[in-house]
Amino acid sequence: MFDCIIIGGGPAGLSAALVLGRSLRTVLIFDQGRPRHAPTRHSHGFLTRDGVSPAEFRRFAYKDLSAYPSVKMINEEVVDVRQGASGGVEVLSSTGKQAAARTLLLATGLKETLPQIKGLDSFYGQSLFSCPYCDGYEIRGKKLVLITESMNAFATARIIQHWSKDLVLCTNGHSILTLEQYRILGSKGIQVRDQPIHHLVGTEGKISGVVFTNGDQLYCEAGFVTPQLSQPSAICYKLGCQMNNKGAIQTDDFGRTNIRWIYASGDSSVVSPTQLIIAAGEGSRAAIGINMDLIQADF
Ligand SMILES: Cc1cc2nc3c(=O)[nH]c(=O)nc-3n(C[C@H](O)[C@H](O)[C@H](O)COP(=O)(O)OP(=O)(O)OC[C@H]3O[C@@H](n4cnc5c(N)ncnc54)[C@H](O)[C@@H]3O)c2cc1C
């Protein structure tokens, strides 16, 4: 019986493991190894780690954790979780490994679904990004496109134009702007292209243009796209975790969900804004909540 099983070995789960290890707790991390920022080459904005690759980021984290022998890790997906008869939780991995713990931390991140546009996948994370705080600096002042089918298109364009005034908003044929929003965008020099997109062009990860279904082409050097975000697994729903109106797992300030001994942290409980450093902070906070609750139960 571990003190805590952590599902998800991104910054949230690994940071929680570090704090729990330092709190003399036995911890088992299950990680499928598909962090949300995997498509990108460089991660930015994490103080002391600005610009490292996702793989390097993990290597630094594993090195920190290797100093704490009570923290173990299994690189497998958790496919089932159930609450144990006498409290605690039991988990089952994809290869049939079973483990039990007094507490469970869900640090499973978020799943992204990109607009269905031919070619988009090959540019995502290299010259097309989703977050200006992560990648806006590197493409500042360039000729940008914003590809979005979201009702937040106007607000997103307003943020992106801060990094480059040379911006074209492509709605891919979706009616997502009001007449007033068209007017304001026009007055700010932001063009809107409403035609459905046929495909994107470019080489070696670098986007160079958008081709519309009517044959028109738009030249660009980089850009942003709005993905849809959802929980990556059904575990939180199966356990009966309460969700908030953004689709995140609802927690208190110490990562506690509505179910006793089940905690959540990172993107899966935050949704916006999502950043490595925020996820790591949330993981640390949940770990402190877990340790405090265990101390209280045992005292
Ligand atoms: C293209 C892109 C670029 C980004 N760049 C930056 C950046 O430069 N700077 C920045 O601060 N943020 C960046 N982000 C955001 C950042 O990636 C997230 O905020 C951060 O990864 C969230 O951390 P997390 O620990 O909550 O989740 P994740 O990092 O997504 O980790 C979750 C882990 O849980 C695992 N998992 C999920 N379900 C299971 C299961 N059932 N069993 C076992 N394991 C499971 C996943 O495989 C994954 O390894 C970027 C995001 C994207 C999409």
Image: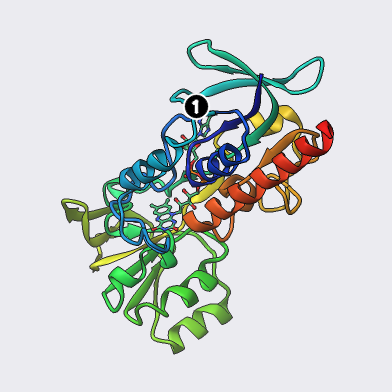
Task: Tell me if I can see residue 241 in this picture.
Answer: yes
Q: Position of residue 94 (x, y in %)?
A: 50, 16
Q: Secondary structure at mark 1?
A: strand
Q: Position of residue 65 (x, y in %)?
A: 45, 38
What number of labels is visible? 1
Q: Residue at x 75, y 41 (%)?
A: 257
Q: Residue at x 64, y 43 (%)?
A: 287
Q: Is residue 100 above or below residue 291?
A: above
Q: Residues within 10 Å of mark 1 (few under 14, many from 20)?
A: some
Q: Position of residue 55 (x, y in %)?
A: 32, 43
Q: Is residue 275 above or below residue 71?
A: below
Question: Is residue 121 toward the left or the right of residue 275 in the image?
Answer: left
Q: How is the image coloured?
A: rainbow
- Give the residue at the far left of this rendering: 203
Task: Tell me if I can see residue 248 in this picture.
Answer: no
Q: Residue at x 35, y 82 (%)?
A: 165
Q: Where is the N terminus found, in terms of image quarters?
A: top right
Q: Which residue is mark 1?
A: 72
Q: Where is the C terminus found, in terms of image quarters?
A: top right
Q: Position of residue 63 (x, y in %)?
A: 38, 40
Question: Is residue 221 toward the left or the right of residue 47 in the image?
Answer: left
The verdict on label 1 being within 8 Å of ligand 1 is no
